Image (cartoon, helix red, strand yellow):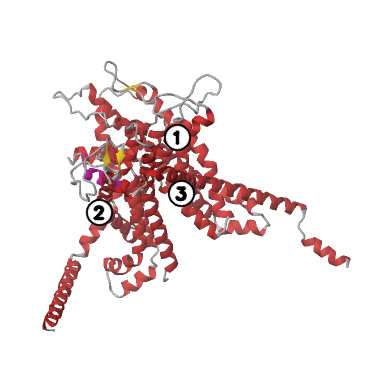
Amino acid sequence: MKNIDNTKNLFAATELINKKLRAQRIVKWIFGAMSITILIPLVALTTCLIIRAWPSLTWDFITDVPKQGMRSGGIWSALVGTMYTVTFSLLVAVPVGVMAGIYLNEYARDNWFTRIVNLAVVNLAGVPSIVHALFGLGAFVVFAGLGKSILSASLTLAIMTLPVIIVSTKEALFAVPVTFRMACWNLGASRWQTIRTIVLPNSIGGILTGIILQVCRAAGETAPIMFTGAVFFKAVQRGDLFPYKPTEQFMALSYHLHTISTQVPGVPESMLYATAVVLLGFVLAFNAIAIVLRTRIRNRKKW
Amino acid sequence: MLMLGALCGHICSFLTRFRRTLRIVRRILGIVSERTIVSLIFLCGVSAVIFVFGIFFFVFREGAPFLRHGFDAKEFFLSPDWYPTSATNKRYGILAQLIGTGTVTLVAMLVAVPFSLGAGIFIAEFCGKKAREVMKILIELLAAIPSVVWGFIGLMVMNPLIIKLTGAPIGLNVLNAGVIVGLMSVPIIVTIAEDAIRAVPDTYIEAAEALGATRWQLVRKVILPAAKSGLLAAVLLGVGRAVGETMAVLMCTGHSINIPFDGKAPFFHVLDSVRTLTATIAAEMGEAPRLGANTDGTFPPEALHYQALFVIGIVLFAVTFVINVTADLIVKGIRKRK
């Protein structure tokens, strides 16, 4: 009888083990609380913004143009301007970015040159947005003679968001198994034929995710368009889908938010909040689409 | 009936024609020799290098006249007098802005680093798979909030809050901008820190677990020392992000040229308004005219403002370049060791 008790005691938690486990539990709670703390702002701020914006958040607010020196009306002109720049920047950034991703994953050898290219991609992502703005001003507005226009702003945004597409394309291509490529090469296909018929179709979801993230980034940026084409105000017809020419200056949602909240006195508070909510909603919605798309691809993978 | 038949015939012939066209298009695509496409891909591949050089070249090109004509590095970096539009005595000293950027970054890192590293450790080591997925998605969403919206939050939400809590006369100051920029740099620090922690070889962890270490002992004694340089890289990238942030600091710092230090008691006044390098460019570029050179090659004094802003751009570019390259080399070093 006594013997059995002894064996039991042998495996029972000692004081030391209890102490260690207690320490672990406390630490886990602390780190958990820290993680929650950094996520609270996301939830709290979004709710706060939406509540304060509620009186102005109507369909009319979105489709109407700014009136009375931006103190009433809506945000249509800015919204369309943002769509313009996003579309134009997509047209430039997607082909270049996808091909750069293809180069880095499919063609580049593991040598010093590829390391430099990768370093350049990292740096392009890390350069402050205001320096991109200076580059856009120096290169497109002044040097290329495009003037302050949608084209200049879109090109600046395209270069700024290029790393997003390059990195996600690279990752999407990397996820396609090498065996697929080998099978194709063994059938006599060339490198480009393999990429076109096997690699790209199998990685299109991942590339699409990158493109959506690029849209988010381009829609939210303010600094790069400030000196390259965005203006304070531009008269536009209500509901007009094509109010700007590519060589004209334009209004953009992010810049509009900046100007009405810092430079126009007497704008109703709920309108300010509503503008912020529309911009935030646009960006978060696109991000959510990208996340859903990525999760579905990951779950549906055939290999 | 007849009409229907005719219609069907039309559709059929259209379809065959369409198919034929498609085939021709495809053949043409095939004929476009592989070499052309490959060289196009190569060109796009190196475009990032071209763009980085392009950024440096064009920013330098616009700022160069300022550097050539009467540039005094000592005055530029060590004088707090920034009077670019003064009628009689224009002075270009960016010390106050340098200190502004430095203090905002410092406060931002004091806010962001402990919380981000804690969250990184929690996500990598302490929580379940489901919780990890949710956390990562939320952090990604946090990263997606545009900087102008952050600035707006600082202006409309934080500003009255700080006035109420601290009794400061104005809520747009180092503290406000620091907290906002700190929140903005949280996602990148968490992501890189988590990667660094997960890159610790499994064998280390198994060895520690076999010796009976608890999770916390494992983290403290094995994982943190092993992931040290990766965590450093994460913090560096956070610093890079904070230094380069523009719109949020433009809207939250109060934008006054001021050095928030003095000889009296707390020395560092976190409730002072400051101005950063990025905000200076953003606020003043709109009013600085780009003027050409006179016939004798000299520039009118009004042209220097525009050029000085580009020189600030060069400084920012250089700082973030060094930070990014260092962080990248550290991360690469870890990967190679693995």
Vertical order, A226 against A62 (above or below)? above
Looking at the rendered structure, which numbered label has been put on residue B177? 1
Looking at the rendered structure, which numbered label has been put on residue B331? 3
Same chain for the residues at labels 2 and 1, yes or no? no
Work out which quarter of the rendered image holds the N terminus of chain B and state it. bottom left
Vertical order, B150 against B263 (above or below)? below
> What is the span of residues highlighted in magenta in the rendered image?
A148-159
Pointer 2 chain: A
Mark 2 or mark 3, whichever is nearer to me? 2
* Magenta highlight: main SS: helix
Give the CA separation, mark 2 to mark 1.
35 Å
Give the CA separation, mark 1 to mark 3.
29 Å
User: Are there few (<14), some (14-19), or many (20+) residues within 10 Å of tag 1?
Assistant: many
Looking at the rendered structure, which numbered label has been put on residue A91? 2
Whether A152 is among the magenta residues is: yes
Counting from the top left corner in percent of width and height, residue A209 is at: 36, 58
Q: At x 34% / y 59%, what residue is drawn?
A: A208
Whether A144 is among the magenta residues is: no
Q: Is residue B181 or residue A275 the one in the foreground?
A: A275
